[in-house]
């Protein structure tokens, strides 16, 4: 398989990824090209990151302008693109204050710090515990992997960071155990992306919100994968009739530029004061220029609505596919974050799709995850279904 980088040299990057035998060198819209000139339909979007497709021209122009002006300056100075992006995020969400990071894990790490510090410095309580859920995914730093409810992510990294407790997802009965004297916050995804594309039940999440409000526990939603239009609204929480205290963003926020964010209410943001949190690169001029252009384009073009329509069309086609191929047990997810659930392993289907020039990913061993750009066309969805059909015809479950 094509891999010119490795043809002569020993691999120098660490073995942290089971990489596919594919080297991507160019992208445009819903397509990417490999180093041999083959064109692929990309329904993985760098894992829910290139929500406007690859190299979106509006964002590209703004970043090109910024490249001529200033790449980086410290957060010791005012950064216009950072402040504008914060104001725009505030205008389109529950939030009143924003902190920028470079990644999703850092955004969650900061949210955990904010929850603890709000409890201890603003409320004067000694609560520190953050409740999270089984199958969740919150990142790879020591605190965020400790927050993650999956043993395989934590394997070999003990001792874990103390102060987390995991409850079963979508289990109303288990909410009886939510509140203790030590609990300061709850952190969860509304669609568990990495953990198998499980969507929160409406009744469960509303019950959870009620418990949080009654007991002054912060409701923190990890929207790193569900945010930026992915589930059919700019943020997924809008579809659940809840008002969070904190949300975290990353993936789609910068259209591929490393950028994350913590969004909080005015009250909760009091948890941070000058000197209590920071980042050298977080919110730098280049990244926030990409973020601002991404959000401007999303709002002006109503991309979330497009994602909702494309998601409905894709789901309808997938349900038809399920009729023809009962090996598909279930179709889960929201908008353009969809999972096809099988009884058996699905890696073979990912490989087959790649051979037929379609890129998709998994969410655990037996779930195919389909993450098109939100700008995807019906024709591109039809092309995806055709490739999936071919793969399913040859599928040998094991
Ligand atoms: C990807 C992801 C993260 C981690 O983001 P990184 O940018 O890889 O650190 C955290 N939470 C969720 C829900 C994610 O999908």
Image (cartoon, grey):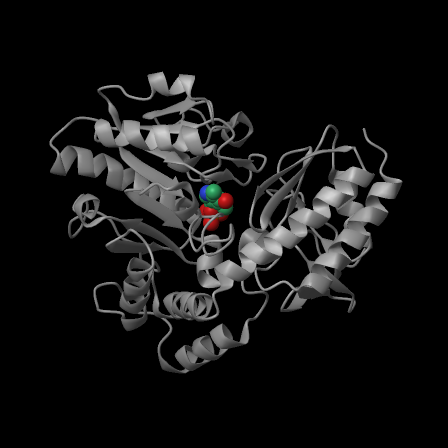
Horizontal side of 249 relative to 353 (left or right) equals left
Residue at image coords 48%, 73% = 59
Horizontal side of 122 relative to 211 (left or right) equals left
Q: In this view, which residue lies farthest toward the right? A: 394
Q: Nearer the viewer, residue 288 or 181?
A: 181
| Count of marks, rendered view | 0
Work out whether residue 8 can be spotted.
Answer: no
Q: Position of residue 13 (x, y in %)?
A: 60, 50
Q: Is residue 305 above or below residue 248?
A: below
Q: Nearer the viewer, residue 239 or 279?
A: 239
Q: Nearer the viewer, residue 140 or 62?
A: 62
Quadrant of the snapshot with the N terminus: bottom right
Residue at image coords 74%, 55% = 384
Residue at image coords 32%, 33% = 209
Quadrant of the snapshot with the C terminus: top right
* Image quadrant where residue 198 sits: top right
Q: Position of residue 149 (x, y in %)?
A: 47, 28
Q: Is residue 357 above or below residue 331?
A: below
Residue at image coords 52%, 25% = 151
Q: Position of residue 99 (x, y in %)?
A: 29, 54
Horizontal side of 196 relative to 345 (left or right) equals left
Q: Position of residue 308 (x, y in %)?
A: 54, 55
Work out whether residue 152 can be spotted.
Answer: yes
Q: Is residue 58 above or below residue 97?
A: below
């Amino acid at each position: 398989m094509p891999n010119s980088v490795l043809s002569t040299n020993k691999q120098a990057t660490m073995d942290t990824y089971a990489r596919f035998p594919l080297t991507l060198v160019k992208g445009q819209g819903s397509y990417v090209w490999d180093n041999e000139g083959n064109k692929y339909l990309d329904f993985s979007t760098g894992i829910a990151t290139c929500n406007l497709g690859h190299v979106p021209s509006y964002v590209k122009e703004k970043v090109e302008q910024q490249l001529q002006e200033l790449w980086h300056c410290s957060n010791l100075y005012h950064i216009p693109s950072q402040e504008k992006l914060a104001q725009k995020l505030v205008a389109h969400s529950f939030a009143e204050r924003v902190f920028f990071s470079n990644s999703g894990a850092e955004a969650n790490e900061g949210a955990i710090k904010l929850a603890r510090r709000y409890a201890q410095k603003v409320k004067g309580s000694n609560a520190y515990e953050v409740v999270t859920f089984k199958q969740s995914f919150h990142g790879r730093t020591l605190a965020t992997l400790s927050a993650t409810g999956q043993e395989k992510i934590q394997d070999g990294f003990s001792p874990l960071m103390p102060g987390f407790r995991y409850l079963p997802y979508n289990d109303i009965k288990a909410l009886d155990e939510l509140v203790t004297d030590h609990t300061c916050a709850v952190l969860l995804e509304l669609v568990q992306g990495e953990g198998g594309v499980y969507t929160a039940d409406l009744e469960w999440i509303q019950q959870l919100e009620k418990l949080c409000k009654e007991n002054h526990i912060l409701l923190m939603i990890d929207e790193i994968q569900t945010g930026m239009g992915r589930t059919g609204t700019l943020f997924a929480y809008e579809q659940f009739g809840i008002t969070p205290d904190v949300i975290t963003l990353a993936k789609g926020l910068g259209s591929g530029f490393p950028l994350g964010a913590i969004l909080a209410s005015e009250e909760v943001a009091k948890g941070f004061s000058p000197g209590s949190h920071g980042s050298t690169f977080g919110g730098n001029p280049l990244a926030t220029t990409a973020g601002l252009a991404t959000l401007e384009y999303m709002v002006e073009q109503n991309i979330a609505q497009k994602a909702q329509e494309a998601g409905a069309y894709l789901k309808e086609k997938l349900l038809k596919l399920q009729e023809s191929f009962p090996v598909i047990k279930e179709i889960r997810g929201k908008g353009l974050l969809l999972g096809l659930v099988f009884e058996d392993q699905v890696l073979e289907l990912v490989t087959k799709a790649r051979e037929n020039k379609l890129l998709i990913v998994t969410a655990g061993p037996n779930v195919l995850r389909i993450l098109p750009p939100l700008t995807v066309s019906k024709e591109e969805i039809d092309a995806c279904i055709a490739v999936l059909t071919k793969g399913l015809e040859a599928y040998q479950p094991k």
